[in-house]
Amino acid sequence: MTPRRVLAALAILALTAVQAQANPEPWQLNMSPGVTETSRMVYDIHMLILWICVVIGVLVFGAMGYAILKFRKSKGAVPAKWSHNTTAEIIWTVIPVLILVGMAWPATNTLIHMADTDDAELTVKITGYQWLWRYEYVGTDVNFVSKLDRDSDRTRMLGSGLNPADVRTGDQNTYLLNVDNPLVLPTGTKVRFVITANDVIHAWWVPVLGWKQDAIPGFINEAWTRIDTPGTYRGQCAELCGKDHGFMPIVVEAVPREQFDAWLAQKDAEAKAAATAANVPATGDALAVVQ
Amino acid sequence: MATHAAHHDDHDHKPGFVDRWFFGTNHKDIGTLYLLFSLLMFFIGGSMALIIRAELFIPGMQIVNPEFFNQMTTVHALVMIFGAVMPAFVGLGNWMIPLMIGAPDMALPRMNNWSFWILPFAFLMLLSTLFMDGGGPAGGWTLYPPLSLQGGNSMPFVIFAIHMMGISSIMGAINIIATILNLRAPGMDLLKMPVFVWTWLITAFLLIAVMPVLAGAVTMLLTDKFFLTSFFNAAGGGDPVMYQHIFWFFGHPEVYIMILPAFGVVSEIIPTFARKPLFGYQAMVYATASIAFLSFIVWAHHMFTVGMPLGGELFFMYATMLIAIPTGVKVFNWVSTMWKGSMTFETPMLFALGFVVMFTIGGFSGLMLAIVPADFQYHDTYFVVAHFHYVLVTGAVFSIMAAAYYWLPKWTGVMYSETLGKWHFWLSTFFVNLLFFPQHFLGLAGMPRRIPDYNIAFSDFNMWSSIGGFGFGLSQLLFAWIVIKSARGHGPRATAQVWEGAKGLEWTVPSPAPHHTFTTPPVIDDRVLAHGDVTH
Ligand SMILES: [Cu+2]
């Protein structure tokens, strides 16, 4: 293998590794660190609490296991008479308080970071419907709905006889995780979302972005993201919203900024052209009626 | 006058079947009715869970349509919470509280009869909605509007059923408070009561405080749907999020209503089989009271993703984290009770130890869920499903089974087979972990809850979970068999003491407990109490 080939192979490996952590995989055990600074902060907190719980668990269950093995009647254990110990009780009240403070500190910082929706360069309005999503790029005419892809939709029918394993996009199984029109977003750009719903409550969730946010009819919620790596990121509606709640996935297509700008300009032009085209015959008809 | 008194002292007076079981006011009979009703509901709710797990066995829709799937998740939860877990604890309270405090019966026996007999009708009505046009409720047991308002004709029936369950619970709670505060035998001071009685006393106050809140919330849903009000309809000036605040103001204390008596049960069983007084009795009581207090100020941790202001999120996060402290005290005290004890491992002890370990696992995931930024990821995923089934199944339900095995000889007068009991414990423990532990992984990998179908990536752990579900469900037939055999009097005679290390008034009466007990108050001897630091 030439050094160049090795490099290429490594690059492919690195790419697939990124790809692999972006979407749910078989036998996945843990949360994905995601593709944004926020999602990594969330992941770090998750791991911190998880390990704290593991350590406490090992201590408590260890003590319990030791007691179970050691203080058995069958081993001739004679019960002690004491029934309290003030020092021990103070220690195991105070130490948990300190541990909790240690958890609350990074959690508070992350939360403050996540709540700051200022200085976004792009705003996208997300509206949940039973059972699809509408995306509007605020300040442009670009506005479309995004719903479950046909393949998944056919396959998910009761007794369809179709195999969910056959619903693929490239080498990935995308059963119930693919849509007709993905939400295209630029990488390296702070994007603000305003999120609402039209009928019942939904929740917009793409795990690798690190959060979910309820979409509530009559109310507007805010959230933001800045995606580091281009890629296709999949998620689902996370709030029970009726019979097809399980069938309204979310797909984010993150592309480099220039590519995104070109895409948005083209879509905007198309939308404006379509709007004009739609208006012309309408005016014609109106005239015809007058005549 | 003398003949009159003699007539009342005649304990062999046997009422007919209908008089005894339908119109009776005896606390033991009503306790039995509650427990049998709960067992029945446990199997009905369990069958619904098995329909869910069968559909989720492999990806693709094979068995039910999504509408019916949603009805199953909704009704499963309502049946298990209001039909299985809560009545089981009321049954245990009915049977054991008078026996533990030396009272002849509950303070309000006629109301006791009524509070039980409302329940079968409430659940008949709730379950009947599954056969109505448009089916049963399908918006989740939390009945969030606007979705719950989209339901068919079932809604008023469900709401009326919830009202009846609420009335039943409130009456049961009033009865328990009245009994504990008024009917304790002389010398049974509040701080000498068994912990089970304490936890029930506090639980009863929680019930009285929050059941009316639930009644209010669902009544507003009803008027929104049928009487043109707009409490929760944004288009009419209402607020769908307000429903969630009201609901969880009920819902979070409700969680403790289902777990505090479980703490009580375990605090009775561990000292018995460790042959050592309960460690930190007073700390246990104060921890229970603090958990109850905190339960009123943490409700919005169920709704971190609705878009609360930063300050609100922080407050509810900190308040929720505080609950870890009294809960930790309890766990440490149970372990300390075992420490330097002389332990044996009969079936009730196995279930109690299983409770301590697995409830603690549920507590850990609860702590994780309290951390708002992490909750943004966990919320509404299978991680949450795993969490609350650890606290409710391996927590509350395991404690109920521990209690049943602990007191069954007292109720029936016969010992069940330890071998069968142990089989039941080990099978249940193995399968319940196979059922719920992998759900943590599913949630972390990104599987939302309440979905009838899923991507291939989630298939392996779902299959494990379903196998665990069926294994756990079938293992419970063993429990039913053991209970029925004991109830029919098959097995060796039990002594009054039943367990070598058992302490407390309930063990001073014969097994089975006679129909009437403590018609004259017993003399309390501190040495028969199950806990230590009461004498100073
Ligand atoms: Cu939805």
Image (tube, grey):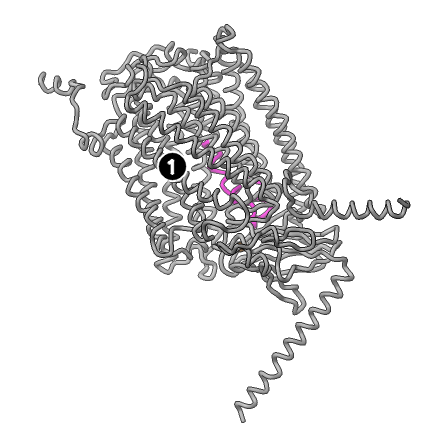
Q: Quadrant of residue A66?
A: top right
* Mark 1: amino acid: Phe
Q: Residue at x 58, y 45 (%)?
A: B447
Residue wearing tag 1: B43
The quarter of the image holding the N terminus of chain B is top left
Determine the residue positioned at 31% across, 38% down. Answer: B168
Quadrant where the C terminus of chain B sits is top left
Count of numbered circles on the image: 1
| Residue farthest along the front direction in this orientation | A161
Q: Quadrant of residue B188?
A: top left
**Residue B238 on image: x %, y %:** 45, 57
* Residue occupying image coordinates x 16% and y 29%: B16
Q: Along the horizontal axis of the image, is B219 left or right of B29? A: right
Whether residue B93 is visible:
yes
Where residue B271 appears, x then y in whole percent? 45, 16
Where in the figure is residue B394, as x and y percent of width and height? 48, 30
- The answer to whether residue B43 is magenta is no
**Does the residue tagged 1 have its C-beta within 8 Å of any atom of ligand 1?**
no
B178 to A5, vertically: above or below: above
> For the residue labelled by badge 1, is the local secondary structure a helix, a strand or a loop?
helix
Magenta range is B292-316
Chain of residue at mark 1: B
Q: Is residue B210 visible?
A: no
Instruction: Check disc 1: other Cα within 10 Å, few if <14, some if 14-19, many if 20+.
Output: some
